[in-house]
């Protein structure tokens, strides 16, 4: 989107050198109030009117001006800098860059580090920025040049992969989770929590493992097995983070029985007792979703969980949507089915990812006809009206887009409002090791404009395949992945991979038990 070969394209994020070139060109032309400047100043004046109504004392402006422009100047130039700061935070990036071209004073303001930190907080959320600030480098708090960071996130094209090391507890025998697939992996309370899954021989697992992965864990993890005995063994279940708790639903055991029970897991890190985790069955009443496994789920906010689809009784793929509403103390829950038209077709092995606010993204999976899908749906609960909206795009118009259809992949929200998609398998069960990003922030802004995105408008430009460097994981499917609170680090564990019994034999399926860390390549 930003760098293209051949014909030049318009940049949504101009580089500093290009901004300088444009500013010099404007100065050389000696046109103090061209159409572009007037457009931006007019926008700022309209934002000023809105802000004026929010302040008890009106902002200082030139009362003698009967129009926005008098003698080549604007009343905007007399506004106090802190008020201009507030106005700029209401504008999109392209308007902010245009505003920087009007004069040196405004350029200095729009390129200030304090403004760009506020823009990062506006667009990525306070929790992400606070998590970034909490990371130390050699014992010192890391300082970010916020404008450069924002630009690098916008232009992200690479990730760096590394295999994480583990070590035993003191001199004890090394304890590690068994290789598995279709398990759950979550990041909560500074810890990675691994539960269940399927292993060799089609057997389920019922073990829970916890490893601290908070600040400064030095790339070495120590897994601790939690002896709880519950929930019962299963694979293809879902487990999401809500606050400081885990909410687990459904799954399939090694007898093929589908589950529809709901569990709450509480993780705590103690100085004296180490890491503890306790599970308890949630009371949800008599109305519950039909039993299933291989469905998709995610949290919607601090009190709700969303599930869709999966494989139900008799192997039938489902297409229903359910929402779990939790009580404030997380001791009770109420399931409610939501029926809307249109809605995603029945499927399994897909993903649901919360993307901020009241929106969730569904991607991929395997359909009723066993076909592997590549469609994208947005679940929107804004204004109390729940609806599914399909986001259309043409694979032919996306570079390497024909490789996008997949099932058994992972999809996680990373810093910058991007969906990071990894791995999975195609309709021929060829396992993938590629990384893709979908720019959800642009999708949601289009949705807010009131016009659903169409293939010829924007969706094909929002996909980008990333380069991967370092110790790349081999192709895998039905692995699990989660991100830390900064949205900068992705953890990948397990999955089904191709293996060789010996060089003379054809490849066979095996389960993987390695843990990888995938970092966004940012030069800060």
Image (cartoon, grey):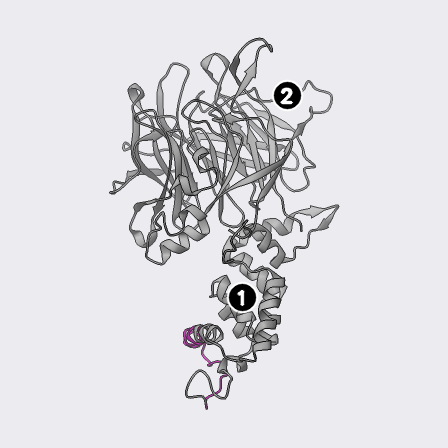
Front one among 40 and 4 = 4
Q: Are marks 1 and 2 in contact (CB under 8 Å)?
A: no
Q: Is residue 25 above or below residue 516?
A: below
Instruction: Using the image, tell me which numbered label, if any, was put on residue 97.
Output: 1
Q: Looking at the image, which is closer to me, 452 or 263?
A: 452
Q: Name the element at disc 1.
A: helix
Q: CA distance from mark 1 to mark 2?
A: 54 Å
User: Camera-side residue: 284 or 85?
Assistant: 85
Give the residue at x 52% y 58%: 11
Q: Which labelled disc corresponds to residue 208?
A: none
The residue under the point 36% across, 53% down is 447
Residue 249 image-quadrant placement = top left
Q: Within the magenta stretch, is there residue 36?
A: no
User: Magenta: predominant secondary structure element?
Assistant: loop
The percent coordinates of residue 22 (x first, y second) are 57, 68
Q: Is residue 307 above or below residue 257?
A: below
**Left or right: where 379 falls relative to 23:** left
Q: Position of residue 470 (x, y in %)?
A: 65, 34
The span shown in magenta is: 45-64
Whole-percent x and y of residue 19?
59, 65
Residue that label 2 marks: 175
Q: Earlier in the sequence, mark 1 or mark 2?
A: 1
| Residue found 50% across the figure and 28% down from its top | 432
Q: Is residue 462 visible?
A: yes
Residue 330 seen in the figure = no
Label 1, residues with CA under 10 Å away: few <14, some 14-19, many ≥20: many
For mark 2, give the secondary structure: loop
Count of labels in the image? 2
Q: Residue furthest front?
A: 6
């Amino acid at each position: 989107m930003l760098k293209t070969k051949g014909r030049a394209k318009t940049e949504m994020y101009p580089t500093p050198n290009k901004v300088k070139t444009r500013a010099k060109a404007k100065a050389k032309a000696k046109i103090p109030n061209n159409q572009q400047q007037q457009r931006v100043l007019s926008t700022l004046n309209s934002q000023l009117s809105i802000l004026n109504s929010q302040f008890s004392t009106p902002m200082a402006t030139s009362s003698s001006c009967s129009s926005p422009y008098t003698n080549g100047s604007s009343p905007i130039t007399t506004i106090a800098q802190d008020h201009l700061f507030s106005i700029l935070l209401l504008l999109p990036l392209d308007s902010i860059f245009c505003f920087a071209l009007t004069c040196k004073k405004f350029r200095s303001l729009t390129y200030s580090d304090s403004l760009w930190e506020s823009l990062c907080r506006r667009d990525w959320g306070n929790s992400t920025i606070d998590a970034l600030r909490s990371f130390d480098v050699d014992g010192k708090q890391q300082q970010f040049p916020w404008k450069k960071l924002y630009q690098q996130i916008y232009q992200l094209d690479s990730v760096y992969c590394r295999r994480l090391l583990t070590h035993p507890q003191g001199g004890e025998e090394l304890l590690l989770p068994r290789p598995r697939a279709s398990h759950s992996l979550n990041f909560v309370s500074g810890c990675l929590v691994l539960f269940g899954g399927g292993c060799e021989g089609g057997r389920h697992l019922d073990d829970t493992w916890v490893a601290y992965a908070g600040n400064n864990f030095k790339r070495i993890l120590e897994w601790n097995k939690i002896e709880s005995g519950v929930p019962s063994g299963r694979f293809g279940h879902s487990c999401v983070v809500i606050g400081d708790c885990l909410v687990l639903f459904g799954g399939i055991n090694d007898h093929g029985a589908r589950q529809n029970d709901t569990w709450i897991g509480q993780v705590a890190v103690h100085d004296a007792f180490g890491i503890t985790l306790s599970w308890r069955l949630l009371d949800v009443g008599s109305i519950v979703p039909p039993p299933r496994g291989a469905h998709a789920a995610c949290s919607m906010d601090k009190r709700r969980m969303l599930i869709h689809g999966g494989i139900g009784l008799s192997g039938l793929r489902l297409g229903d949507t359910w929402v779990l509403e939790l009580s404030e103390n997380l001791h009770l829950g109420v399931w409610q089915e939501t029926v809307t038209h249109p809605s995603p077709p029945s499927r399994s092995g897909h993903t649901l990812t919360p993307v901020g606010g009241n929106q969730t993204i569904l991607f991929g999976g395997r359909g009723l006809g066993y076909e592997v899908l590549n469609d994208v749906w947005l679940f929107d609960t804004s204004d109390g009206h729940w609806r599914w909206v399909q986001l259309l795009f043409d694979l032919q118009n996306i570079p390497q887009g024909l490789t996008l259809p997949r099932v058994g992949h992972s999809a996680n929200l990373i810093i910058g409002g991007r969906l990071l998609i990894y791995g999975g398998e195609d309709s021929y069960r060829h396992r993938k090791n590629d990384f893709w990003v979908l720019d959800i922030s642009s999708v949601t802004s289009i949705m807010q404009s009131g016009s659903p995105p169409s293939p010829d408008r924007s969706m094909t430009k929002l996909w980008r395949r990333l380069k991967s460097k370092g110790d790349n994981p081999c192709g895998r499917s039905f692995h699990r992945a989660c991100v830390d609170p900064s949205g900068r680090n992705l953890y990948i564990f397990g999955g089904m991979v191709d293996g060789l019994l010996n060089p003379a034999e054809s490849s066979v399926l095996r389960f993987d038990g390695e843990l990888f860390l995938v970092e966004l390549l940012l030069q800060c």
